[in-house]
Image (tube, rainbow, N blue to C red):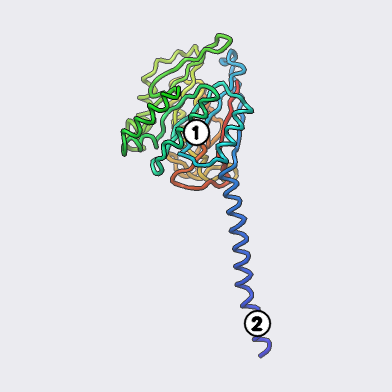
Amino acid sequence: MNKIRSFLIKKRKLPRKFVVDFIVVCFCFSCFLVYDNFSLDIEKIKIEDTKAENLKGLKIAHISDYHNRKSEITNKAIFKALDEENPDLIFITGDLIDKSKTDIDTSLSFVSELCEYTSVYYVTGNHECNVSIEDQNAFDDMIKSLQNMGVFVLRQSTESVILPNDSKVNIYGIDDPYFHCSYSYEIDGASSALCDGFKIDKNEYNILLAHHPEQLPVYAEYGFDLVFSGHAHGGQGRIINQGLIAPDQGFFPVYTGGEYKEGNTTLILSRGIGNSIIPVRVFNKPHLIFVEF
């Protein structure tokens, strides 16, 4: 009888220990998620291209997929990095806003602070397209507000930048292809049509801002030297530096973050700042890139 009683007492203790262990694990994992989602990963990429020799010293900050991010911690980290790096240009490659939390003023406030550093260039993403479908006036007002700040809003347009050494770089920007198609299987054709609208002088150095990284083969076909994109969110979560899932790429996507090559074209891909449908990042901090020639 004593042995049975002793056994039962031990059995009652096991669940309590399990609960304590479970709470500790959940607490540690929660702390990790907070750290992983609010700290900032700063990546520096050096462009080695003989065609860009005249651009030596040019530095670009690349921000994407802000998604109306409401985080003073992340914003301060971004502004601190900009203070330290002092970029010549800032590129925003789409999804500045979010269709499910359309607090556009949050993003406009963020961009207004970016404009205090240097010239800002912006292209739309699929979330801007979705917002325009639901509320065209809100989208139009946002574009006007950005333009009034002095942001170069590139919607099938080009801006040429003359550097202090009189070198020239062309910055092209295409609309998100979902402004021009309805289904994912139409994106390739829409991206080609958008790029086809430009007359590109391949003797000059040409940069493209385009939200979709999976369209790199299209961008390379048209002869862009350097492309900046977002959209993939780093694959949402990452295991051994492999993203798990990305829009318009599916599971285990090819393009998730960093630098990629296709022929003579280089793609610089941001893992983004904010979150959207999937609310958390795992091993995938908010991502700010500095590109230097």
Residue hosting label 2: 7
- Quadrant position of the N terminus in the picture: bottom right
What numbered label is drawn on residue 138? none
User: Which residue is at the front of the view, 110 or 65?
Assistant: 110
Q: Amino acid at mark 2?
A: Phe
Report how many numbered discs are placed on residues in the image. 2
Residue hosting label 1: 110
Instruction: Determine whether, in the image, residue 60 is placed left or right of residue 132.
Output: right
Snapshot quadrant of residue 283: top right
Q: Residue at x 42, y 18 (%)?
A: 158
Q: Amino acid at mark 1?
A: Phe
User: Which residue is at the front of the view, 78 or 26?
Assistant: 78
Rendered view: 220 above or below 55: below
| Mark in front: 1 vs 2 | 1
Q: Where does residue 45 sit, x and y in percent of width and height? A: 60, 28
- Counting residues from the start of the chain, the first of labels 1 and 2 encountered is 2
Snapshot quadrant of residue 73: top right
Q: Residue at x 58, y 26 (%)?
A: 291
Q: Residue at x 36, y 20 (%)?
A: 197
- Quadrant position of the C terminus in the picture: top right
Label 1's element? Answer: helix
As measured in the structure, the alpha-carbon distance from the residue carrying label 1 to the one carrying label 2 is 62 Å
Label 2's element? Answer: helix
